[in-house]
Image (cartoon, rainbow, N blue to C red):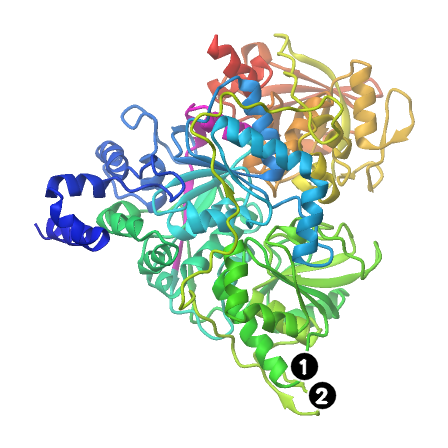
Amino acid sequence: MATYCLTVSRLQLALGHGARRLHVSAALSAKAKVAMSRFESNSHINYEKLQSNLNIVRNRLNRPLTLSEKIVYSHLDDPAGQEIARGRTYLRLRPDRVAMQDATAQMAMLQFISSGLPRVAVPSTIHCDHLIEAQSGGPKDLQRAKEVNQEVYNFLASAGAKYGVGFWKPGSGIIHQIILENYAYPGVMLIGTDSHTPNGGGLGSICIGVGGADAVDVMAGIPWELKCPNVIGVKLTGTLSGWTSPKDVILKVAGILTVKGGTGAIVEYHGPGVDSISCTGMATICNMGAEIGATTSVFPYNHRMRTYLEKTGRGEIASLADEYKDLLVPDAGCEYDQLIEINLSELKPHINGPFTPDLAHPVSEIGSVAEKNGWPLDVKVGLIGSCTNSSYEDMGRAASLAKQALDHGLKCKAQFTVTPGSEQIRATIERDGYAKILSDVGGVVLANACGPCIGQWDRRDVKKGEKNTIVTSFNRNFTARNDANPATHAFVTSPEIVTALAIAGSLSFNPETDYLTAPNGEKFKLEPPTGDELPARDFDPGQDTYQHPPADGSSLRVDVSPQSNRLQLLEPFDKWNGKDLEDLQVLIKVKGKCTTDHISAAGPWLKFRGHLDNISNNLLIGAVNIENDAVNKIRNHLTGEYGGVPDVARHYKKNGLSWVVIGDENYGEGSSREHAALEPRHLGGRAIIVKSFARIHETNLKKQGLLPLTFSDPTDYDKIRPDDKISIKGLESFAPGKPLQAVIKHADGTEETIQLNHSFNETQIEWFQAGSALNRMKELQH
């Protein structure tokens, strides 16, 4: 009865005195239908259905459930019949919505167009954030991007309108910030075509990064497959304070788990320390969970999330979440596959890098470590913002340090850039004075976009090959990622530490103990940063940058010019011929780390993301060839000459020679970009054989009809020579759990046979046999 009365009182509060004239049952019915977002009044949150599904699963499993299990299992297509075993079975799921950034949306929408379907089956959005290059500052960079990318933006806007997809125009902000502000909510399951989609876990959501083909499945209304995740628990105790920030939690976790320690698992944060972290701070932690290979990360619903929902105009969702809170927190006594404990009161500020995001150092030690390793101590550029750290709180805390420096007559010694996460954040920090303080200390405010974080940075202060150090509040710091310079030592840390190091100009500066010198000779220490979690005067939404799709877009046209070098309609890949793959030429045997940046570089190549043939010219140009330790230099075994990887692959394809790539551990870590799978398929690749895969890349390869295979014995990697040919046997009886054989044929005439493992299930084998998942989808339509 108390809940009933409370609901009625909330209704009267929300609806005003007019609620008196409503019949109570009608009012309750109206209240029960809470829209998923302010843009989709006809799509409602259905906690009741999720609870019903969960009850079925709970009765079957008969054990306490983790939060991630509750949300994932409540989205099962068949909760009564689905086999559920962590780390083993594949789940068929029904996500609530899809989000795509503009670089990956091009290929996703081209694939959706190829499917022949008239309209998306779930709420979906496109976000223009990846194609804006940082040069001189926000307004000029944005205007130039609109001119340079007009063809792509027009394609995405018109495709969105025709097929029912919401379109966020360039300048709106970074996809993950827009999702947090508008679409994420406790208990939602969202898939996004970007590896940092887990950002939404800061609002109690299960948000998972995928390739475009996975997004097409969900937009087509087909159940989406995910291997049942293990669950890693991170128990937080104590309280954040002083210089320690939410970013330090994930920097510490990355140091513990490494870049592949979270593979196949959801990281679930819990414990009394959670309440000391803001909602946007939780999002920061979940965002960078992508760097440990995690499927996603999530926090339990609490009052910090409620406050954020209310501040972003979603009080109704918060009230509904309150009523279903048991669905949105873990059960007492639930068990994790691995448990990590972190005392926030003892956690120190961290900085990770260079060249990998899991090389963790306390800030107090980085100076001596850098000196020992010969890393440049002078900080050339400090960069704050990005999808990981661009909240109002982040900007406020950075501004508090900048203000202290200005008060003592100091500006940044290093160059300093600021990337607002969204138009709403930009407008609000401008209104509240943070933007001016950050500009006055020497900062350049860039466009509301990804910018330098993904390599969209026209950097001119150092020459390519010049050794230098930058510090960022980004999430990823692979070699050459930010500025295309392999000699740049990039370190990731919190916005507060970036700001302090940019002011000091040195990696050896420890803001907790060291002094700065003012122009008048006065020595002073920076006080620990402070900043409001949320603006006291609510957010300023800024400019309206959203295009709502029409109710019926069937009469609209989406044109792709055959002469375009930016967009290209897709042709179906060839079907499997029913036989074993014989005499595949080793294209390249890759040495060491091979991320999706190595396989399909971003930066200037982003402009070709909608044109498969053109972007295939960057295939594996960053991978190290074990034969000569060179990049983009491999032997063409048909001519005997050396050439670039894409050129040799094209030559093999033209001459009817299929090929295979050999790789090391965690192959394909990093971005969700499916181009890293589309390109080898397009240029004649048939299989990728490695020691281990990153989750998203392995799935993307399967979707495009390639064979992602792993050595049963990792030392078999050493048996393969760069000039070998490989035959893959056992495909005529290809079955889940049944290994394949590889016959290695050496140039000297000798042969070796090894065993290869795979993780294909029956549905995925059908993708391979049809030539791709998209081909199989079309077969099933007839």
Image coordinates of residue 3 in percent, x first then y, are: 13, 50
Q: Which residue position is annotated with label 2? A: 519
Crowding near pointer 1: few (<14 within 10 Å), some, many (20+)? Answer: many
Start-end of magenta stretch: 213-235
| Residue type indicated by callout 1 | Leu
Q: Which residue position is annotated with label 1? A: 410
User: Which residue shows up at 62% across the image and 31% down it?
Assistant: 155
Q: Is residue 116 visible?
A: yes
Is disc 1 placed on a helix, strand or loop?
loop
Q: Is residue 455 visible?
A: no
Crowding near pointer 2: few (<14 within 10 Å), some, many (20+)? Answer: few
Quarter assignment of residue 533: bottom left
User: Which residue shows up at 63% across the image and 55% down it?
Assistant: 447
What mark, if any, has residue 243 been given in the picture? none
| Residue type indicated by callout 2 | Pro
Q: Is residue 264 magenta?
A: no
Quarter assignment of residue 558: top right
**Circles 1 and 2: CB distance less than 8 Å?**
yes
Image coordinates of residue 766 in percent, x first then y, are: 52, 15
User: Which residue shows up at 70% across the image and 27% down it?
Assistant: 612
